[in-house]
Amino acid sequence: MAASRYAVIGQPIAHSLSPRIHPLFAAQFSIELSYEAIEIAPAELAVRLPQLHADGYSGINVTLPHKATVAALCESVSERAQLAGAVNCLKRSDTGWVGDNTDGEGLMRDLARLGIAVASQRVLLLGAGGAARGVIAPLLALQPKELVVSSRNPWKPEELAERFKGRGPLRPCTHLALKGDHYDLIINATSAGHDGSMPRLPGPLLVSGGSCYDLSYGKAHAPFAAWAQSQGAAKIADGLGMLVEQAAVSFEIWLGKSPDVEPVLAALRNS
Ligand SMILES: NC(=O)c1ccc[n+]([C@@H]2O[C@H](COP(=O)([O-])OP(=O)(O)OC[C@H]3O[C@@H](n4cnc5c(N)ncnc54)[C@H](OP(=O)(O)O)[C@@H]3O)[C@@H](O)[C@H]2O)c1
C-alpha cells in the first residue's frame, strides 16, 4: 500500500522543520508516511489547494503567508481556528479540507512540559500579531490572574482585547505603559528576534523567580534570551518545544495517535 501523503505549504518553505518532525513521529508507530514541503505563492493557493485534495493528500500544515487566508478555502474551520483568525492544519474530508489551529494547544503543552504555570499568574504577552492572536484564548482558559498584551502599535492590543472580550482578564497595553509592572511569566510573541532585535521595554518587568518563554527559536531566540537573563529569569525557554508540540497536535488530528515529543525535540536540538 502506498504511504499516506502529507505536506506543509508556505512561501518560503525550505526552512520548515515539519518534514523532519512528522516522519520521526510516524516512525514511533511504524506508520508509512510521506511528508513534503511544497512552496505555494499566495496567488496560486486557491488553485493548488483543491489540486492537493485531488492528488490524495491526507493532511496539510499551513505556514506563512497562508495562515490567515486559507480558512476561506476550507469547507469548515474549527472554533479555535476561527478565534485565532488563522488555520495551520488541514485534514482531508471526502469533499474538501477541514481547517484547525494547533499553535495555541502547542504552546499550552510546552508550558506544561516545562513546568511553567499560567493559572493565577500575572502573564505578559509581547506582540499582537498572528501568533499572539492564536495563543490568547488558550492562555485565558488556564485562568491567569491577568493577561496583559503589549505591542509597539497601540491599536493592535486594543483590537485583541475587543476580540477576546468576556474570555478572561485581558488588558491591552503599550510597551511604554508597562513601566513599574511585574509579571510571573513573560511570553515573547514578536518577530523582532528575526532581525536580531528585541522590543524596547521599560526597566525590570519580571518578578524574582519568574519565567520567560519565547515563541521564536534558533538564532531569532538570542535577543530575547539575553534580555530574559538580564531580568534574572529562573526559566528561559525557546519556541522549539512549541513547534514540536503543535506538530504533535496535527499528527493526532490526522492519525489519532499521540507521539512522544521528547525524542523528536532532542533530535532537532542535536542537529
Ligand atoms: N514556535 C512556534 O511554533 C511558533 C508558531 C507561530 C509563530 N512563531 C513565532 O512567533 C513570532 C511572531 O509571529 P507572528 O506570526 O505573530 O508574526 P506577525 O503577525 O508578523 O506579528 C509580529 C509581531 O511582532 C512585533 N514586532 C515585529 N518586529 C518588532 C520589533 N523590531 N520590535 C518590537 N515588536 C516587533 C509586531 O509589532 P507591531 O504589532 O507593533 O507591528 C507584531 O506584534 C515569530 O517569530 C514566529 O516565528 C513561533
Image (spheres, rainbow, N blue to C red):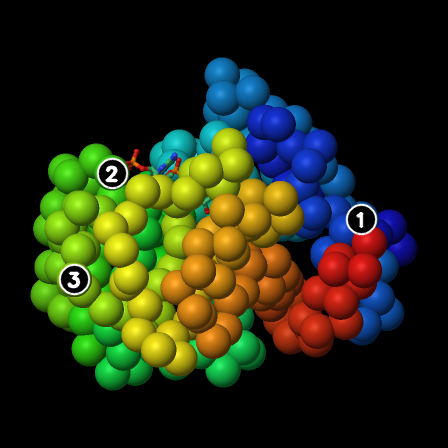
Classify 119 as above or below 200: below
Classify 46 as above or below 172: above
| Amino acid marked by disc 3 | Gly
For the point 49% across and 16% down, which residue is it?
43
Numbered mark located on residue 34 in the image: 1
Residue located beneath label 3 in the image: 180
Task: Give x and y (percent) for residue 54.
Answer: 65, 34
Q: 19 and 97: which one is in front?
A: 19
Sequence order check, earlier mark of 3 and 1: 1
Sequence order check, earlier mark of 3 and 2: 2
Circle 2 packing at 10 Å, graded few (<14), some (14-19), many (20+), is some
Whole-angstrom CA distance, mark 2 to mark 1, is 41 Å
| Amino acid marked by disc 2 | Arg
Sequence order check, earlier mark of 2 and 1: 1
The reply to whether the C-beta atoms of the residues labelled 2 and 1 are less than 8 Å apart is: no
For the point 62% across and 27% down, which residue is it?
12
- Circle 1: element type: strand
Task: Give x and y (percent) for residue 95.
Answer: 52, 44
Q: 239 and 143: which one is in front?
A: 239
Circle 1 packing at 10 Å, graded few (<14), some (14-19), many (20+), is some
Relative placement, left or right, of 183 versus 36 is left
Mark 2 close to ligand 1, CB under 8 Å: yes
The answer, for residue 51, to whether it is visible in the render is: no
The image quarter containing residue 13 is top right
Numbered disc total: 3
Closest to the camera, between mark 3 and mark 2, is: 3
The image quarter containing residue 29 is bottom right
For the point 77% across and 51% down, which residue is it?
20
